Amino acid sequence: MQRRYKLAIACITLAMIALAVHRHLFPKASEPVQSLPEVPEINANKPETVVALGRVIPKSGVISLSGPSQLFGARIAEVNVQEGDEVTAGQIIALLDTFYSQQAELAMAEQRVSVAKARLDKVLAGEAKLGDIAAQEAEIANLEAQLRAEVIEKKALIERMQAELQNAEKAYQRFQVLYEDGAISISDLDDKQEQFEVAQAQLNEVKAQLENIQSSRTQQIRRESATLERLEEVRPVDIAVVQAELKAATAAAVTAASNLELTRIRAPVAGRILKIHTLPGEQMGQNGIVDLGQTQEMYILAEVYETDIAKIQAGQAAIVKLSALSDELQGTVEKISHQIGQKEVFDNDPALEIDARVFEVEIRLNPSDSEKVTQFIHMEADVTIQITSSVQ
């Protein structure tokens, strides 16, 4: 009985092995056969592209508007715009605190020009120096009268002092005789000698004063006479002098106007005020006064790797994607930089691309798309540049 049981088990085992081998060698028709992986079909119509990262910029980039370098650190008196305002080329954006003092200086310079013009008109009309000539003649006459009066006074004094000197000399001579006779002491003789010498010195001093008066007054009269001769010179000389004064006054007014203009901060181009950095009362700093952008035309500044730059040409179409917009933007390659530089726009892992070398490529957005990105300046963009057109 036990032998039959073992035999049955052996038969069943052999049957199961045979069935497994049969299924492996001869699968059923209903069992699916595993298919080979499909080879993707090559699409000859798909264009070749170059992808790059970039950022949104207005035409010519963001303009940092500041004052002249020689006025760096000056304070702002007025800011005449607000962020978001549209401005025209030449519009005054701000005024420096030196505006009002320079304005007053210009007014004074213009007044001096007016005075010089009036003087020139008088010269041309023949009335230039009639009053000056009369005044000069009166001055000369006054000097001559002073000279005559002073000479008369000094000569009278000299005559009186000469008489005193003669008396002192006679007294001294008389005392010499008395001293020789022993009638007076030597001290009495010395007193008379001193009186005589003092009188002589005083006379000499007055004579020197007379000579000095005559010399100085004569020289002064000659100088004033020379001035009178210049005043009486022919009119072309007068005209030339006044014209030179007018020219100098006009040059000073031009300089004052130029200095005044330096205190006016104007927009160099038409555009939009993006950001105000300096408020009234604050000093101009490194960031300037305002940021200005020509947002009428918007661009994408793409950074193309040096290995791809040879494929890029002006006129190629580009597709731009921004995280803030669901729509794709269309643009055209307009300008390609000729200078390689470091990458400034990075993806999620900037460490991997920190040493990457790129060329800047400017892509002008289509007008309809340009309006969509005016609020997204410097936002990162994904750029796809079509190198070849699709085959039709």
Image (cartoon, rainbow, N blue to C red):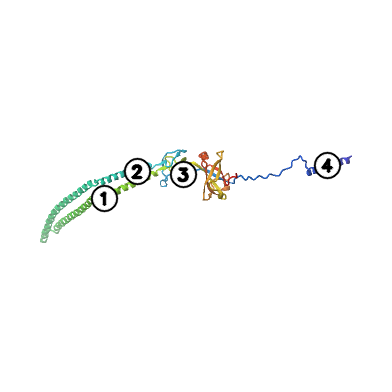
Q: Residues within 10 Å of mark 3 (few under 14, many from 20)?
A: some
Disc number lying in front (4 or 1): 1
Query: In x, y percent, where is residue 9?
Result: 85, 41
For label 4, the residue is 15
- Distance between mark 1 and mark 3 Cα atoms: 54 Å
Kindly identify the amino acid type of the residue bearing the numbered disc 1: Pro
Query: In x, y percent, where is residue 296?
Result: 48, 40
Disc number lying in front (2 or 1): 1
- From this view, report whether residue 341 is shown above or below residue 5: below
The quadrant in which the C terminus is found is top right
Query: Tag 2 or tag 4, which sits nearer the N-term?
Result: 4
Query: In x, y percent, where is residue 137?
Result: 20, 48
- Distance between mark 2 and mark 3 Cα atoms: 29 Å
Which quarter of the picture shows residue 201?
A: bottom left
Query: In x, y percent, where is residue 279?
Result: 44, 40
- Distance between mark 2 and mark 1 Cα atoms: 31 Å
For label 1, the residue is 236
Kindly identify the amino acid type of the residue bearing the numbered disc 4: Ala
For label 2, the residue is 106
Kindly identify the amino acid type of the residue bearing the numbered disc 2: Leu
